[in-house]
Structure formats: structure tokens, C-alpha cells
Amino acid sequence: MAFVISDFEKIGNKSSKNISVEVAGRSDAIRNGLGDYSLGEAMKIIDFFADYFDVAYPLEKSST
């Protein structure tokens, strides 16, 4: 478990299986597009494992 106190910003999108995914990071990094790669890969990974195990993603959302 970790507790972080910071002024993070987040970006999010829905994967091809309609799963909400969000990535948080430093404000300047998010504004400069440095979270886009992580967000894209996270969506691919979640969809891959949903297909691989043939189980729907069990959580309504992955981050808030």
C-alpha cells in the first residue's frame, strides 16, 4: 500500500472492450503527452488478458 500526496493529473480512455482505463502522472508530463504511451499499452494489456482467460474484466473501473 502506498499513499502519495501530489498534484497529479490524469488521462483516460475506454479500451476496445469498453473498459475505463486511466493513467496519472506529474502535471507537466501529462500535458506533454508522456502518459499517452502508458495509457495505450494499459488498454491493450487489459483487453489481451480478458481474451486470453476468456473472462470479462471484473472491475467497473480501473482507477479514479
Image: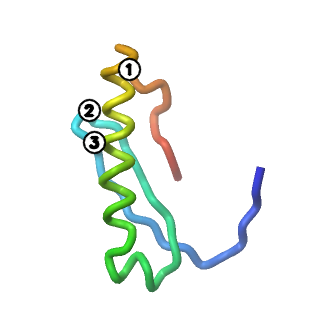
Mark sitting earlier along the chain (2/1): 2
Give the Cα separation between the discs numbered 3 and 1: 13 Å
- Circle 1 — which element? loop
Residue located beneath label 2 in the image: 17
Rendering quarter of residue 48: top left
Rendering quarter of residue 35: bottom left
Q: Which mark is residue 41?
A: none
Residue 60 screen position, x and y as percent: 46, 33
Residue type, label 1: Ala
* Residue 9 vertical position relative to residue 44 in the rendered view, above or below: below
Q: Residue at x 34, y 37 (%)?
A: 19
Do tag 2 and tag 1 residues touch (Cβ < 8 Å)? yes
Residue located beneath label 1 in the image: 56
Q: Which mark is residue 15?
A: 3
* Residue 5 vertical position relative to residue 22 in the rendered view, above or below: below
Frontmost residue, 41 versus 63: 41
Q: Is residue 5 left or right of residue 56?
A: right
The number of callouts visible is: 3
Residue type, label 2: Lys
- Circle 3 — which element? loop
Q: Residue at x 40, y 76 (%)?
A: 30
Mark sitting earlier along the chain (3/1): 3
